[in-house]
Image (tube, rainbow, N blue to C red):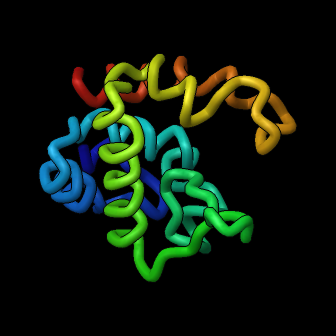
Amino acid sequence: MDDMLSGVLSGYGGAVEKSANKYGVDPALVAAIIMHETGNGSSNAARNKNNVGGMMDPKGGGLMTFKSLEAGIDAMVSNIKRNYIDAGLTSIDAIQRKYAPIGAKNDPNGLNKNWTKGVTSYYNALRG
């Protein structure tokens, strides 16, 4: 996994695997989501807020900020486990419909339509 992570994610494959194993989630799945959500470690959210999942403040304060990349990774994996996997949303397509719905108000440029294809591409490369 480390050889595929870049930008600020370089060297964090172990942190992704540790959190994935902690919550019982497929490491390749969460890594693929993280890679897609951050432009593989290049996004402002990842670089400046340690936010690897586009996680929003539930109180309406915009993107959440985490004290470290490890904390951001752990929060994102915990979110995937609690709000998606535990709810029976286990495929990339099923997760997309809730995580990045097409037509969402917080997607003014319509990028969510690329989510399933992007995550699937990263997932297949990671599973390679």
Residue 71, image x, y percentages: 36, 72
Residue 35 drawn at (x, y percent) = 46, 43
Q: Horizontal and vertical percent for residue 65?
A: 56, 74
Say if 89 sits above or below 35 in the image.
above
Number of callouts in the render?
Answer: 0
| Quadrant of residue 113 within the rendered picture | top right
Quarter location, residue 27: top left
Residue 64 position (above or below residue 14):
below
The residue shown at (32%, 62%) is 74
Relative to 91, residue 38 above or below: below
Camera-nearest residue between 3 and 68:
68
Query: Which residue is located at x 38 percent, y 62 percent?
Result: 75
Pick the quarter of the image with the N terminus.
top left
In the image, 82 versus 112, the foreground residue is 82
Q: Quadrant of residue 107?
A: top right
Q: Is residue 90 left or right of residue 57?
A: left
- Which residue is most to the right? 108
The residue that appears at 71% across and 24% down in the rendered structure is 102
